[in-house]
Amino acid sequence: MEDKQNEFMKYAMCIVPVGSLRKEPSHKTEMVSQLLFGECCIILQKDTGWIKIRCKYDGYEGWCQQGQVGEVDAETYHLETQKLAAGWVNEIYIDDAKLLIPFGSEVRLEKNKKDQPYSGELWNADTVKITTEIIKQIAFTFLNTAYLWGGKSVFGIDCSGFSQTVYKFLNIPLKRDAHQQAEQGVTVNSLQDAKCGDLAFFDNQEGRITHVGILLEDKKIIHASVKVRIDKIDEDGITNIETGEQTHKLKMIKRFFKNTRIF
């Protein structure tokens, strides 16, 4: 039965720099996430210029405009690629037309072809050695990027989109939302035991996880709040370095890597 369903399943790939994923098939509804160029998805439903899709990377579902994706075959969909665009913006040619795609877009290159449509810098997440400097190199690329609910690019990003995208460069898959990411990883007992790259999660008055950030050294954290910024953190939570106000209450810390050169 499953093989028969797969036979008729339709696959697609994002063909614009950044595609919006909405809660319902309307521009007036909430943007729940985004697709970056090259990301693949399964088409679940169609509705007058809109399609409901399920993202391959994190299983997230939402509605996007049909013209922002192009149908691909099963082989392309199932092709695993850890090659990511490594410049802040990068040139790629699709049907001889230039497209500027953002940091973190997936790039699929044809084997044994001399003239490739992409000539920018590539990041191979499959071979990366995770170190403090590598974590900071990736995360700092987003510094001062504006906060955008549902965003996950250098043009606008939310807190969990930020952690997910940084970790994608480390070849560590995270789920899309902060409360989902909090269910992954291994618990770190205290801030004193934390290392650069650990994720800190924060809750609201009802105890629900609402925010996530990436820990740095010296009790600092980089996170998306108004913009991607570096603030101070202690056992109570985040303190805005500009105002001195405590903005987020610390709930837990999780670790997702081991046997790495994290200092």
Image (cartoon, grey):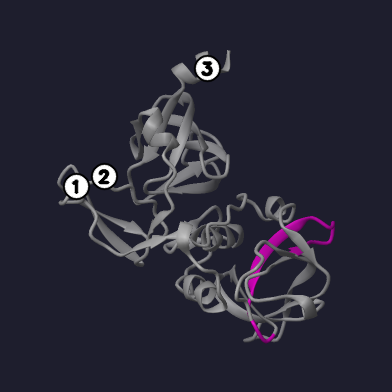
The quadrant in which residue 233 appears is bottom right
Of label 2 and label 3, which has the lower sequence position? 3
Mark 1 touches mark 2? (CB < 8 Å):
yes
Please count the marks in the image: 3
Whether residue 1 sits left or right of residue 145 in the image: it is right
What residue did someone put label 2 on?
110
Task: Provide residue 135's location: percent of width, then percent of height.
Answer: 54, 72
Q: Residues within 10 Å of mark 1 (few under 14, many from 20)?
A: few
Mark on residue 113? Answer: 1
The answer for how far apart the CA atoms under marks 1 and 3 are is: 33 Å
Which sits in the foreground, 242 or 224?
Answer: 224
Q: Residue at x 64, y 86 (%)?
A: 241
Task: Provide residue 245's location: percent of width, then percent of height.
Answer: 72, 82
Say what amino acid the circle numbered 2 marks: Glu
Q: Residues within 10 Å of mark 3 (few under 14, many from 20)?
A: few
Kind of element beneath mark 3 = helix
Task: Provide residue 123's location: percent of width, then percent of height.
Answer: 39, 62
The answer for how far apart the CA atoms under marks 1 and 2 are is: 6 Å
Kind of element beneath mark 1 = loop
Say what amino acid the circle numbered 1 marks: Lys
What residue did someone put label 3 on?
3
Task: Provide residue 10's location: percent of width, then percent of height.
Answer: 43, 25
Q: Quadrant of the N terminus?
A: top right
Q: Residue at x 73, y 56 (%)?
A: 182
Say what amino acid the circle numbered 3 marks: Asp
Residue 135 sits inside the magenta stretch: no
Which sits in the foreground, 186 or 36?
Answer: 186
Q: Which residues are magenta?
A: 202-218
Mark on residue 242? Answer: none
Kind of element beneath mark 2 = loop
